[in-house]
Image (cartoon, rainbow, N blue to C red):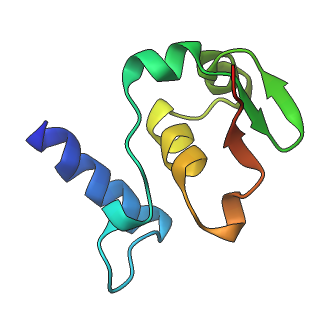
Amino acid sequence: MKKFIYVFTLLCLAVGLMSNSSCSSDVKSTSDSELQAQKVMINNIKYNKIKDAIETLQISRTTVRIRLNSKLDKWKNWYKLNS
């Protein structure tokens, strides 16, 4: 878990989510099981599983997780759908 937090913090710095506050205040955590079963809407395209979005968009699971959970306006078109 500590390794994940370290990598996650580095990714937050890389994508500009961190400012003077910690990255964890901008992003909520998501479990791997939620990532596989969760339906999402990304830029007006519905994906039945996050895995489908990862494969279609050809971006990493971590990037998708950060964007889906971000409170930044830049990613407001990336959100989870209620099942």
Residue 39 lies left or right of residue 2; in this view the side is right
Residue at (58, 50) in percent of width and height: 67
Nearer the observer, 3 or 72: 72
- In the displayed structure, 59 sits above or below 13; it is above
Residue most extreme to the bottom: 20
Residue most extreme to the right: 44
Residue at (33, 86) in percent of width and height: 20
Residue at (84, 44) in percent of width and height: 43
Task: State the image coordinates of residue 66 (x, y, percent, origin top left).
Answer: 49, 48
Nearer the observer, 18 or 37: 37
Where is residue 49, by image quadrant? top right
- In the displayed structure, 80 sits above or below 8; it is above
Task: State the image coordinates of residue 64 (x, y, percent, origin top left).
Answer: 56, 39
Residue 63 lies left or right of residue 68; in this view the side is left
Residue at (68, 16) in percent of width and height: 52
- In the displayed structure, 30 sits above or below 11; it is above
Nearer the observer, 19 or 15: 19
Please identify the quadrant where the N terminus is shown.
top left
Numbered label tally: 0
Residue 79 lies left or right of residue 45; in this view the side is left
Residue most extreme to the left: 2
Please identify the quadrant where the C terminus is shown.
top right
